[in-house]
Image (spheres, rainbow, N blue to C red):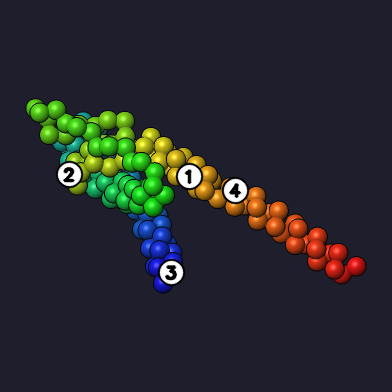
Amino acid sequence: MSLLKSILRWRDERHLLAQLQFGLEEIDAKFIERVKKEKLQRGSDAWRDAYFDYDSHRQLWEADIDQLQTQRYVRRAKAWEVPIPPHPVPAPDSPVCDDEFWSWSQPHGRYYLTYKAQAVLRRDIYAEIEMRYKPWLAWMAITFSALSLIIALIRL
């Protein structure tokens, strides 16, 4: 039952991630369409208002994507017992601090993994998977080869 549940969650997360990424493209297209339709000039007050709306929506969608990806990578890292980079320690005068592995998301008010951290975790997770399964795969290949040789000899 847990296998089915994890497969369904994986499917739902991939679908949600795809929807969010297509939503970013729609937000970009709507902004460009609005600029062309209303003939907004860069630097005007109307253009600044339109850009502020566009940027606000885009930041919210990007934060949702970052949240989903961070949750996925952290969950996989914990499952394979891969160390997760520690959160940055902010200075006393500043409540937030970014580093090479974590970035502060203003819309959600929390830290999310950077692309570099996602790449590091992905590489470490795949190395851990390979380390655990590679010996078994070699023995399985030897076992199947020996089994097929025995069957071939019996058929003669």
The residue singled out by tag 1 in the image is 128
Amino acid type at circle 4 is Pro
Q: CA distance from mark 1 to mark 4?
A: 12 Å
SS for dot 1: helix
- How far apart are labels 1 and 3 at the CA level? 23 Å
C-alpha distance separating marks 1 and 2: 32 Å
Is residue 103 visible to us here?
A: yes
Q: Which mark is residue 4?
A: 3
Element type at marker 2? loop
Closer to viewer: mark 2 or mark 4: 4
Q: Earlier in the sequence, mark 4 or mark 3?
A: 3
Residue denoted by label 4: 135
10 Å crowding of disc 4: few (<14), some (14-19), many (20+):
few
Q: Nearer the viewer, mark 3 or mark 2?
A: 3
Whether residues under marks 4 and 3 lie with C-beta atoms below 8 angstroms apart, the answer is: no
Q: Quadrant of the N terminus?
A: bottom left
Q: Nearer the viewer, residue 91 or 20?
A: 91
Residue 126, x across and y down, in percent: 49, 44
Q: Amino acid at mark 1?
A: Glu
At 40% from the left and 41% from the top, the residue drawn is 121
Q: Nearer the viewer, residue 156 or 13?
A: 156
Q: Which mark is residue 109?
A: 2
Q: Quadrant of the C terminus?
A: bottom right
Most distant residue in the right direction = 156
